[in-house]
Amino acid sequence: MRLMQFRPVYTHAKIGLFIAIMVALALIAWHTPYTAVRWLAYFGLGYMQMGMVTFMHDATHNVLFKPRWENWAFGILAMMPLLASFVAFKEDHLEHHRYNRSYQDPDAFTMGRRRPLDFVLFYGYVAASAPLSFLHFNLLYPIGKFGLRNWAIHLFETALKIVTFTLLFIWAAHEGVLGKAVALLLCPVLFFSLLNAMRFIAEHYETPWDEGKLTGTRTVLSNPVHSWFWNNINYHIGHHVFPRVPYYNLVELHRLIEPDIDGLGALVDRSYLAVFGKALWRGPESEARLKHFLDERGRVRKRAEVISRRAPVAG
């Protein structure tokens, strides 16, 4: 319960700092005459967008701010640069938590039978996670899942984006800077797309199938820079077990549940790049290959085995 307490001053200050960094990077990209510097600024903006999306992720669980309306407002605004629907992401993500690493999990597209379409989907997501997410959250998921309430919110978000970007592009065209404005909007998304695919795949790839939240999730210790800028999303096991704990308490939560993580042999790795590289090499999963790789790693143990070892001996 202590770890579920809100720290609104810290969160507001950190969001303000992130926005200031992004404004500075946008100004550099806009004004620099050097192509290399411009693309470095675009990369920085893509990296910072990843940070804003992890704030949005907490808003999805209503743990970024105490008032629920603030979580909704921030989520909708944070998703605007990516042109994606917050309400669709929210519903999809909560469903992912409910059915983590099972065939009902909407994010379990890495698991299949390794048929040609599985390879197309897997590597297509790696190459273009942002465009595919745009299609999924704006069209496919709403058509398949939404009722009237969510459709109303979704259409409001869509109208807000249409009006905002129409006005922006009209102004940019009038000022003769339409090309620069489009580049500033879209080029950072190229880098965000790759970073997002790396993070997303690392969180659950080759974790045990349909065995629960703790062992069905991976924590990536990574480094303090990623942890801070990406709001501790890398401490993902703790988040899945206790999704009501805000981002700034996930490190302490990890220490508290570390005996359970170690006892069940859940997967803790040290590098996003290492996990992502392995995933790129091995491609889409199948249950048979997953069992082989988990046995080969010798880390994850069945929950029943752990319980039997802990149980007192009768007599």
Image: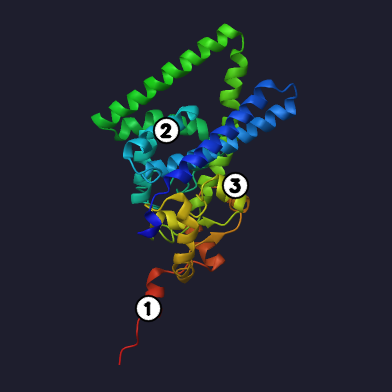
The kind of secondary structure element at disc 1 is: helix
The kind of secondary structure element at disc 3 is: helix
Quarter of the image with the N terminus in it:
bottom left
Q: Is residue 286 visible?
A: no
Residue located beneath label 2 in the image: 136
The kind of secondary structure element at disc 2 is: helix
Left or right: 137 as drawn, with respect to 27: left
Q: Closer to the N terminus: mark 1 or mark 2? A: 2
Is 15 placed above or below 219 here? above
Q: Position of residue 263 (x, y in %)?
A: 46, 71
Quarter of the image with the C terminus in it:
bottom left
- Determine crowd level at label 3: few under 14, some 14-19, many 20+ residues with C-alpha closer than 10 A: some
- Report if the CB atoms under discs 1 and 2 are less than 8 Å apart: no
Which residue occupies the extreme top position in the image? 174
Left or right: 149 as drawn, with respect to 305: left
Q: CA distance from mark 1 to mark 3?
A: 37 Å
Q: Is residue 65 visible?
A: yes
Residue located beneath label 3 in the image: 280
Which mark is nearer the camera, 1 or 3?
1
Q: Quadrant of residue 123?
A: top right
Q: Position of residue 197 (x, y in %)?
A: 54, 41
Residue located beneath label 1 in the image: 308
Which residue occupies the extreme left position in the image? 148
Q: Nearer the viewer, residue 19 or 51?
A: 19
Q: Nearer the viewer, residue 250 or 119?
A: 250
Q: CA distance from mark 1 to mark 2?
A: 43 Å
Q: CA distance from mark 2 to mark 3?
A: 22 Å
Q: Amino acid at mark 1?
A: Ser
Q: Amino acid at mark 2?
A: His
- Report if the CB atoms under discs 1 and 3 are less than 8 Å apart: no
